[in-house]
Image (tube, rainbow, N blue to C red):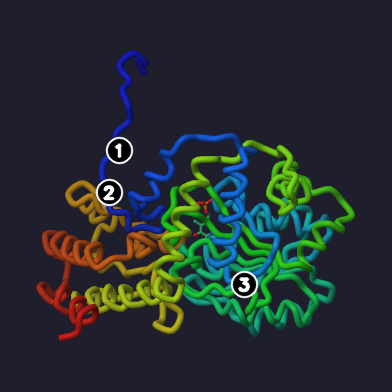
Amino acid sequence: MLVNSIQSFSPPRRILMGPGPSDVHPRVLAAMARPTVGHLDPSFVAMMDELKALLQYAFQTANPLTLPVSGPGSAGMETCFANLVEPGDKVVVCVNGVFGGRMKENVERCGGIAIVVEDAWGTPVDTAKVAAALAANPGVKAVAFVHAETSTGVESDAAALCALAREHGAYSIVDVVTSLGGVPVRVDAWGADAVYGGSQKCLSCTPGLAPVTFSPRAAAAVAARKTKVQSWFLDLNLVMGYWGGAAKRAYHHTAPINALYALHESLLMLREEGLEAAWERHARHHRALVAGLEAMGLGMLVAPAHRLPQLNAVRVPDGVDEAAVRNRLLERYGIELGAGLGALAGKVWRIGLMGQSCSATNLTLCLSALETVLAEMTAPIREGAALPAAAAELYGR
Ligand SMILES: *Cc1c(COP(=O)(O)O)cnc(C)c1O
C-alpha cells in the first residue's frame, strides 16, 4: 500500500436493509459533526443527564443505573455478564440463535457455569423448558436470553421469562439490541434486571454505543460483589464515578463525545415520533413487506406469531444462489440485505426494517429490485403482484 496515493474516504450511498447498522438520519450525522468539547465540560455533563432521561424513556424504566456503555452492543453484553456473574455462579442461558451462543461464552469467561436451554433456530425460547431447568438446578443466579434474535428474526416472551427468573430468586439478563425502539421493550413492567441494547439497529444511530440499564436490586448486587469485576473498563462500580448522578464527576475514560451527541439526537427523534408510533410503524411496514414477498411466492422462516417486524428471515427459493442475489442488489441498487448465519447460511435472506430503514420508500424499492433480480435468474416467482400487495397493506385499496 503506497500511502502517498491515499485520499479521503468517500463511502458509497447505501440503503441498509440488513441486520444492522440501519440507515442513519442526516440529523444524527449532523449532530456528530458538532464541535468536540471536553468530557467534563459543564455543557457536556448537562447533555449526559438528558441522554440518561432519553434512555430511560426508550427502555421504559426509572432505573437510576441507566447509561450508554462506550462500545458496541457486544460491550453491553459483556457489561451485564461481567458485573452480575461471579466465579461459580450458575446461569441458565437460553440459546435459539447466534447471540444466545455468545451469552454462554460470556458466562464461561466470567467463571460461571452455563446451564444451556436450547431451542431450534427460527423458534422462540420455550418458557416451559426454562422453568424445568430452574426447578432442576436450585440456586441459579441469573436467567439470560435474547428478546429479539437477529440471526433468525424471532421474538421471545420477555415478560414471561423475566417473571420466571424472579419466581426462582434469579436475576434476568436480557438482550434487547435489536428490539429496542422496534417492538415494545418495557424494562420496569417486565421486572428485568440487567438489560443491554445497541445504537445501530432500531435506534438508527451510528454503531459503537450500548445503552444498558440495571434494576435497583441488580445494581445492589454489583455493589456487593465478593470479587472484583474482572474487567476494569466495564466495572460499573468505577464507571458510575463518571456517569453517576452526583454533582462531582470523575474521569474514568474519555467518553466518545461526538458519538454521544449522535445518540442524543437519535433518541430525541424517537421521543418526537413517540415510542408507540415507532412500534406501530415497524409493525405496519413489516405487514406490507410480508404481503409483498408472499404475493411474489416467497415464504417466511418464522411462524407469524413469533416474527420480529424489524428482521425478516425470508426463505431462498430452491436453486437460487442467495449470495448472487444479494451482490446484484448491492451493486445495482445499493441495497444491502443480510445473509443467513450458521445452519441458515444459504437458506434465508435477512431483510431489516430497522429504525430509519423502516420506510415505505425502502420497502417498495426492495420488493421491486428483488423481484427484478429473481426474475432475471429465472427463479419460480410471480411477477407484478408484490408492489400492489404491499401498497394495499400500507394505503388500503
Ligand atoms: C447486533 C447484535 C448484538 C451485537 O451488537 P454489536 O454492536 O454488533 O456488538 C448483540 N445481540 C443482538 C441480538 C444483536 O442483534
Residue under the image location 33 percent in, 65 percent down:
358
For residue 50, the mark is none
Element class at badge 2: loop
Q: Which callout, 3 or 1, points at the residue further toward the start of the chain?
A: 1
Question: Is 243 left, or right, of 303 in this rendering?
Answer: right
Measured as percent of width and height from the top left, residue 230 is found at: 78, 46
Q: Which residue is mark 2?
A: 14
Alpha-carbon distance for marks 2 and 3? 33 Å
Q: Amino acid at mark 1?
A: Pro
Which circle, 2 or 3, is nearer the viewer?
3
Alpha-carbon distance for marks 1 and 2? 9 Å
Q: Nearer the viewer, residue 22 or 130?
A: 22
Quarter location, residue 65: bottom right
Q: Amino acid at mark 3?
A: Val
Does the residue at mark 3 contact the one at mark 1 (Cβ under 8 Å)?
A: no
Residue under the image location 32 percent in, 54 percent down:
16
Residue under the image location 47 percent in, 67 percent down:
181
